[in-house]
Amino acid sequence: MEKKKNTEEINIYTEEGEITFGGLFRFLKKTFLRTLIYLIVALIAVSAVYSGVKYGMREEYGVSAKIEYTFKEISSGKNPDGSLFDKEEIRSVNYIREAAQKAELTEKILAAGNDISNLRSALSVSPIMPEAYIKAYNDLVASGVSSVDAYAQLSQSSFYPTQFIIKLGNFETLGLNKNEAETFLGNLLETYRASYGNRYISARVISDAPFKVEDSDLYDYADYVSLYETVYDTVDSYLSRMLEQGDSFVSSDGTTFAALESQMPFLQSQLMSLGALVINAPVSKDLPALKTNTAHAIETLTVEQTRLQTVVDGMEETIKNIKPSTVTTLPGGGEAIITATYPERYYILQEELIAVKTQLAKVTADIAAKRRLETAIADKTEVSVADKATADGKLAYIKRISIDFIAVLNKASKEYAEKNVADNGMRVVSPASSYAVSPKFPTALAYISGAAVAIAASFIVTFVLGKTKAKRARLQAAETADNGAAQEKE
């Protein structure tokens, strides 16, 4: 029996110049289990090494989320209140600080040697350009326009994204792990979403306090006119924005924003009547004091006008000298991510410039009004008692109708906000999750190579062991034969 087994081993491994199916089958059968074990070990090793290499050679990593603004004004680049939309608002220090506190990460971030500004710098907001933009870009390229020229042309068009990718990059440098980074980003989105709704969609309460100011020598008739003009301008601007977004709204008592806006000319005409009386009569509680105060106001406002104009000139020169950053990645199909081509300071200065120009325009208008009043009262020496009584009556009437009007406006505004705030604002499309950008390695090739090495190693080991075992069998057979021959001689 032993002799037969040895002969089989020799036949498998020692036949010269011939490969038989039987021998090959027996060989594969003997290598099957070893090959399976080697494959498992190789795949585990490749996974460990491959993951380690990708992790160690990461070019970028972090957590990201996708958000979408759902109000109609976003398609024209505006907030629900009509102001310009700023995608960077979510990165404000106040939102970041509140989100870090909610996630209980403030102390850990500070302990790692960072501060809130470092956390803000790690955040980025990238728009996902709408399909219309992608189609327009592809059409331009297909017509022979270069990628750079196509991008330049589209940058002048009114394409406004509604979805954005929010990223917190390289969070480990902030002392955070993946779970903490995801928690922070989730809290930031929730904090911003709640604040956005309250800020832009909730009711704006117009104060009626200016119309409840008691009559005193501190306020002359001209002061009331100026104060009420400011309030009416605020109300008129607010109603215009509400009409844009709530033109079909009807409150519980049947009030519409259109009806409220139609009442504004009457209110303003009453105030203009009082203003005309102040200038033409003229009417004043203290005419000499009014002349002195008017001259002083013109002088003060002129100084402020000069200061603001200097600020505007300086800011415009600074903005003109800010050059665009490097060209961003162009869309190539799917969702294109386009980042700003100017540094953040450029956009901040633009917003500040608008605010300063608005102040300058108001100061200029105030100077013109004061000069008209100064001219009208320059040669006046006394005030008619009858005109003063008329002014008192007009002032009381304006106060009464203004208080009633603002009460109706605030009621309608509150009802509109309660009805619409749940359906507008910002929603999270994809919650915070981790991502990593690593050098591109052919994953399939790595695993195929590992499997090939494992199979080759299994065959080689099996073959070598088989050869060794066959050699032993031959030696054992020869030894057995020699022993048998010796016994026969005896």
Image (cartoon, grey):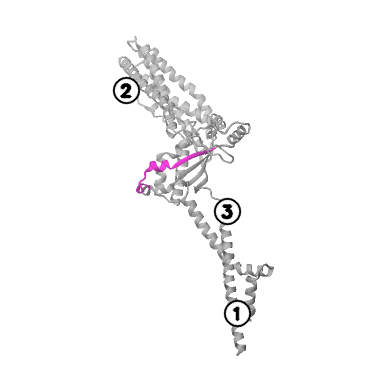
Q: Nearer the viewer, residue 463 or 258?
A: 463
Helix, strand or loop under label 3: helix
Label 3 amino acid?
A: Leu
Q: Kindly report which numbered mark, 3 or 2, lies closer to the viewer in this rendering.
A: 3
Q: Residue at x 37, y 12 (%)?
A: 375
Q: Nearer the viewer, residue 432 or 459?
A: 459
Label 1 amino acid?
A: Ala
Quadrant location, the N terminus: bottom right
Q: Are marks 2 and 1 in contact (CB under 8 Å)?
A: no
First-in-chain label (2 vs 1)? 2
The spot of residue 8 in percent (x, y) is 64, 75
The span from disc 3 to disc 2 (Cα, nearest Å) is 86 Å
Pointer 1 residue: 478
Q: Residue at x 47, y 27 (%)?
A: 237
Q: Which region of the structure is painted magenta?
A: 109-128
Q: Local crowd at mark 1 within 10 Å, few (<14), some, or many (≥20)? A: few
First-in-chain label (3 vs 2)? 2
- The residue positioned farthest toward the top in the image shown: 379
Helix, strand or loop under label 2: loop
Quadrant location, the C terminus: bottom right
The spot of residue 17 in percent (x, y) is 67, 67
Pointer 2 residue: 218
Q: Nearer the viewer, residue 197 or 385?
A: 197
The spot of residue 242 in percent (x, y) is 51, 31
Q: Which disc number belongs to residue 445?
A: 3
- The residue positioned farthest toward the bottom in the image shown: 490
Residue 254 seen in the current view = no
Query: Vertical placement of 375 versus 414: above or below?
Result: above
